[in-house]
Structures are given as structure tokens and as C-alpha cells.
Image: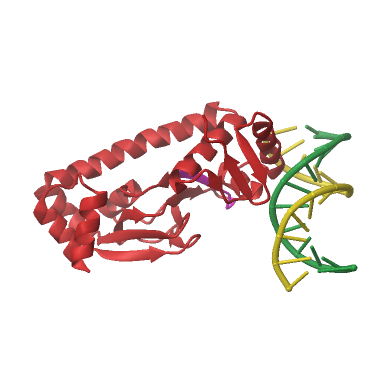
Chain colours: A red, B green, C yellow
Amino acid sequence: MEDSIFQLVKQHFPQLVEKQLQEEIAKIGKIYFFKADETIMDFGQYIKLVPLLIKGSIRVMRENEEGKEILLYFLKPGESCSMSFSCCLTYKQSIIRTVAEEDTTLIGIPIQYMDQWMGRFPSWKNFVMMSYDKRMLELVNVVESIAFHQMDQRLWDYLQKKSIATQSLLLNTTHQEIANDLNASREAISRLLKQLEKMGKIKLKRNQIRLSDNE
DNA sequence: ACATTAAGTGATT
DNA sequence: AATCACTTAATGT
């Protein structure tokens, strides 16, 4: 078990170079499996683990006062959750919900190790900083997208992101789900999807959207 | 065959 | 672009 975690870390997180760090992750970390659509972390929960994603993908979302959710971004293998870093520094409750997009595997590290590892392992510190940086950029893009882009662009972005996150050109989803993620109405999504289909960018079936392989 | 759920349409604001 | 009020199509029992 320890051995396999050790291998997984080397494989998916090659930037964590210190041998000792790899060993500690293998010793301390535990592997967790989540089924598709399983909630990993919900609003208000206290974060006790930092996840290192090995397989699958995770959707990170935010809920507003009326209970409407909006998708912020996807997490993919080789990534971690920046929100968990900040939450564990301050011991705050989670302000986001994370749900497994598909069957997902991750290594969970108890948060009490974050601090000491930051000091002891430069590559860990770097990893955390890089994660922050990446997510910050991502979120700026999300804000821009919501503030300035029209729905058709947001929808196209969404399809691309989802395709990348799931490593597949075939998306199993409904128009309603997409509408929820983008905080739009189902009818609007249906209409825009059909435009995209007319342009030859996608192919629609019930519960399925197939992206064309060309750009 | 029937019921349920996803998707399409047109009108209204 | 949202909402409503349908209609039509696909699928499960």
C-alpha cells in the first residue's frame, strides 16, 4: 500500500522531488475512492484533508443564497485543491462544494502536515504556490467569462473544459445539468447547443453530446 | 402500451 | 436571456 502510493506520487506529481517528501506522503497519505456524483466536500464542512488527485476529475462549485450552484472549475489528476490549502491555514469551513465528476481516486493528506512540509520541502512549497497561481488565473477567467462573455462562448468553453477534464469527446450530460452549471435556463442551453450542432462543432443525442475532433 | 423524462418551440417580458 | 406553456421524442417498465 505504502509502496503503491509512493509510485502514484512519483507518477502524477513528479514536481515533488524530495525523496523524503515522497516517502512521507506514502506513509501518511491514504487513498480514497469516490464514485461518480459522490460529494467529496460540502459547504460548511471543515477540511481535514488535502487531496492529491490521481484519477478521474472533480467539479468545484459555489452556491449562492438561493441555493443556485455555479461551476467554478474542474480538478484533474496531478492537481490539488487550492481552496483546501487556504482553508487549512485558517481552519475555516469550506465555502465550496466538490463532487466527483466521474469515478475518482485521490490521496488524502491530513492538513496538520501542510505547515511543516512547507518549511521542510521546497518542492512542496512550490507546488502549493503554483497551485494557487494556477487557480487564481482560472478564477479570473471565470469572472471574466461570467461578466463579459455571452452565453454561447461560455457554453463552448464549458464543453471544452468538460471534455478535457473527462478526457473524452463524448459528454454524458443533459441540457438541464449544463444549464445548472452555467446558471442559465435549460431552453437557452438547448437553443445554443443546437446552433453549435448546426455549425458542426458538436453532435447531439439524448443525454449525450459528442464534440467534433477538429477544433 | 403507457409513463416518465429529456429536449424542442413559440410567445411574452 | 428568463420564464411559461406546451409539444415532441426517446426510453424505461
Q: Is residue A165 above or below residue A155?
A: below
Q: Name the side, left or right, on which A149 lies relative to B5.
A: left
**Foreground: A155 or A102?**
A102
Dominant SS type (magenta):
strand
Could you say which quadrant of the image residue A195 lies in?
top right
Could you tell me which residue is drawn at 14 percent across and 47 percent down?
A: A17
Q: Is residue A28 visible?
A: no
Q: Which quadrant would the N terminus of chain A be assigned to in this image?
A: bottom left
Q: Position of residue A98 (x, y in %)?
A: 44, 54
Q: How many marks?
A: 0
Could you tell me which residue is drawn at 48 percent across and 62 percent down?
A: A38
**Magenta segment includes A72:** yes
Q: Name the side, left or right, on which A17 lies relative to A128.
A: left
Q: Name the side, left or right, on which A87 lies relative to A9.
A: right
Q: Is residue A180 visible?
A: yes
Image: magenta residue range = A66-73
Could you tell me which residue is drawn at 58 percent across and 36 percent down?
A: A155
**Magenta segment includes A215:** no
Could you say which quadrant of the image residue A165 lies in?
top left
Q: Position of residue A104 (x, y in %)?
A: 40, 59
Could you say which quadrant of the image residue A15 lies in?
top left
Q: Position of residue A183 (x, y in %)?
A: 60, 43
In this view, the residue farthest toward the front is: A213
Could you tell me which residue is drawn at 63 percent across and 31 percent down?
A: A200
Q: Position of residue A65 (x, y in %)?
A: 55, 50
